[in-house]
Image (spheres, rainbow, N blue to C red):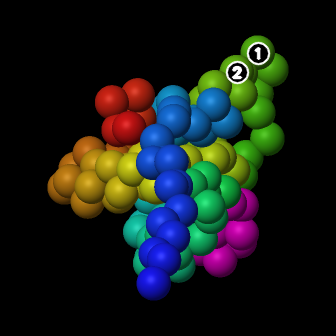
Amino acid sequence: MVLTVAAVPALSVEPCGLCAREVAINPPLAACLLERYAVLATRGNGVIAVDLSDCERDRGIVASLPSVGQSTEDEPDLQFMLSRAQLDCLKTQLEKPGLVRDPLTRIDLGACE
Protein backbone atom coordinates (compact mmCIF):
# COMPACT_ATOMS: atom_id res chain seq x y z
CA MET A 1 0.00 0.00 0.00
CA VAL A 2 1.39 3.38 -1.01
CA LEU A 3 0.29 6.44 0.93
CA THR A 4 0.63 9.75 -0.84
CA VAL A 5 0.62 12.94 1.17
CA ALA A 6 0.31 16.27 -0.58
CA ALA A 7 2.36 19.05 0.89
CA VAL A 8 0.27 22.17 1.29
CA PRO A 9 2.10 25.36 2.19
CA ALA A 10 0.84 27.07 5.30
CA LEU A 11 -1.24 30.10 4.52
CA SER A 12 0.16 33.20 6.08
CA VAL A 13 -2.01 36.11 7.06
CA GLU A 14 -0.87 39.17 5.18
CA PRO A 15 -1.92 42.69 6.01
CA CYS A 16 -4.87 43.94 4.01
CA GLY A 17 -3.67 46.69 1.69
CA LEU A 18 -7.22 47.79 0.86
CA CYS A 19 -8.48 47.84 4.43
CA ALA A 20 -9.28 51.01 6.33
CA ARG A 21 -6.80 52.20 8.94
CA GLU A 22 -9.39 54.41 10.62
CA VAL A 23 -13.18 54.55 10.61
CA ALA A 24 -15.15 57.75 11.21
CA ILE A 25 -18.54 56.82 12.64
CA ASN A 26 -21.47 58.34 14.52
CA PRO A 27 -23.81 56.67 17.05
CA PRO A 28 -26.61 55.68 14.61
CA LEU A 29 -24.13 54.15 12.15
CA ALA A 30 -22.31 52.36 14.98
CA ALA A 31 -25.60 50.83 16.11
CA CYS A 32 -26.38 49.80 12.54
CA LEU A 33 -22.97 48.15 12.13
CA LEU A 34 -23.40 46.25 15.41
CA GLU A 35 -26.81 45.02 14.24
CA ARG A 36 -25.24 43.75 11.00
CA TYR A 37 -22.12 42.28 12.59
CA ALA A 38 -23.29 38.64 12.51
CA VAL A 39 -23.97 38.83 8.77
CA LEU A 40 -20.80 40.79 8.00
CA ALA A 41 -18.67 38.32 9.96
CA THR A 42 -19.72 35.50 7.63
CA ARG A 43 -18.83 37.40 4.45
CA GLY A 44 -15.67 37.84 2.53
CA ASN A 45 -12.62 35.79 1.93
CA GLY A 46 -10.31 37.61 4.30
CA VAL A 47 -11.58 41.07 3.32
CA ILE A 48 -15.05 42.31 4.24
CA ALA A 49 -16.78 45.14 2.39
CA VAL A 50 -18.88 47.20 4.80
CA ASP A 51 -21.60 49.38 3.33
CA LEU A 52 -23.59 51.46 5.80
CA SER A 53 -25.03 53.87 3.24
CA ASP A 54 -28.54 52.45 3.59
CA CYS A 55 -28.37 52.78 7.39
CA GLU A 56 -28.93 56.51 7.04
CA ARG A 57 -32.20 55.94 5.22
CA ASP A 58 -33.21 53.12 7.58
CA ARG A 59 -32.81 55.38 10.58
CA GLY A 60 -34.25 58.53 9.07
CA ILE A 61 -30.95 60.38 9.25
CA VAL A 62 -30.83 63.18 6.74
CA ALA A 63 -27.33 64.20 5.82
CA SER A 64 -26.96 67.95 5.75
CA LEU A 65 -25.29 69.70 2.86
CA PRO A 66 -21.72 70.67 3.65
CA SER A 67 -21.14 74.30 4.51
CA VAL A 68 -18.78 76.37 2.42
CA GLY A 69 -15.29 75.43 3.48
CA GLN A 70 -16.44 72.36 5.43
CA SER A 71 -14.16 69.40 4.97
CA THR A 72 -15.40 65.94 3.99
CA GLU A 73 -13.24 64.72 6.88
CA ASP A 74 -16.18 65.72 9.08
CA GLU A 75 -18.37 63.07 7.44
CA PRO A 76 -18.79 59.48 8.65
CA ASP A 77 -17.41 56.63 6.58
CA LEU A 78 -20.30 54.83 4.92
CA GLN A 79 -18.30 52.33 2.86
CA PHE A 80 -15.00 50.74 3.79
CA MET A 81 -13.06 47.48 3.68
CA LEU A 82 -11.94 45.58 6.78
CA SER A 83 -10.11 42.38 7.55
CA ARG A 84 -11.95 39.92 9.79
CA ALA A 85 -9.61 40.87 12.66
CA GLN A 86 -10.40 44.56 12.11
CA LEU A 87 -14.15 43.86 12.02
CA ASP A 88 -13.93 42.01 15.33
CA CYS A 89 -11.78 44.77 16.82
CA LEU A 90 -14.16 47.48 15.58
CA LYS A 91 -17.11 45.62 17.11
CA THR A 92 -15.28 45.48 20.45
CA GLN A 93 -14.52 49.20 20.26
CA LEU A 94 -18.11 50.12 19.34
CA GLU A 95 -19.46 48.14 22.28
CA LYS A 96 -17.56 50.29 24.78
CA PRO A 97 -20.10 52.59 26.49
CA GLY A 98 -19.72 56.25 25.63
CA LEU A 99 -16.95 55.76 23.05
CA VAL A 100 -18.96 56.81 19.99
CA ARG A 101 -20.30 60.34 20.29
CA ASP A 102 -22.07 62.85 18.08
CA PRO A 103 -21.28 64.24 15.66
CA LEU A 104 -18.37 61.91 14.81
CA THR A 105 -15.83 59.61 16.40
CA ARG A 106 -12.68 58.36 14.67
CA ILE A 107 -11.62 54.84 15.61
CA ASP A 108 -8.03 53.83 14.85
CA LEU A 109 -7.87 50.29 13.43
CA GLY A 110 -4.10 50.25 12.94
CA ALA A 111 -3.52 47.98 15.93
CA CYS A 112 -6.38 45.61 15.10
CA GLU A 113 -4.53 43.21 12.80
Q: CA distance from mark 2 to mark 1?
A: 6 Å
The residue positioned 48% from the left and 66% from the top of the image is 5
Say left or right for 27 vs 53: left
SS under mark 1: loop
Q: Which residue is mark 2?
A: 71
- Residue displayed at 33% across by 49% down: 89
Disc 1 packing (10 Å; few <14; some 14–19; many ≥20): few
Furthest toward the bottom, the residue is 1
The mark tally for this picture is 2
Q: Are marks 2 and 1 in contact (CB under 8 Å)?
A: yes
The residue nearer to you, when weighing 48 against 78, is 48
Q: Residue at x 45, y 48 (%)?
A: 10
The span shown in magenta is 50-60
Task: Report the amino acid beneath label 2.
Answer: Ser
Question: Residue 29 at what x, y percent from top left?
Answer: 52, 59
Q: Amino acid at mark 1?
A: Gly
Mark 2 surroundings within 10 Å by alpha-carbon count, few (fewer than 14), some (14 through 19), many (20 or more): few
Q: Is residue 105 magenta?
A: no
Q: Answer above or below: position of 54 versus 93.
A: below
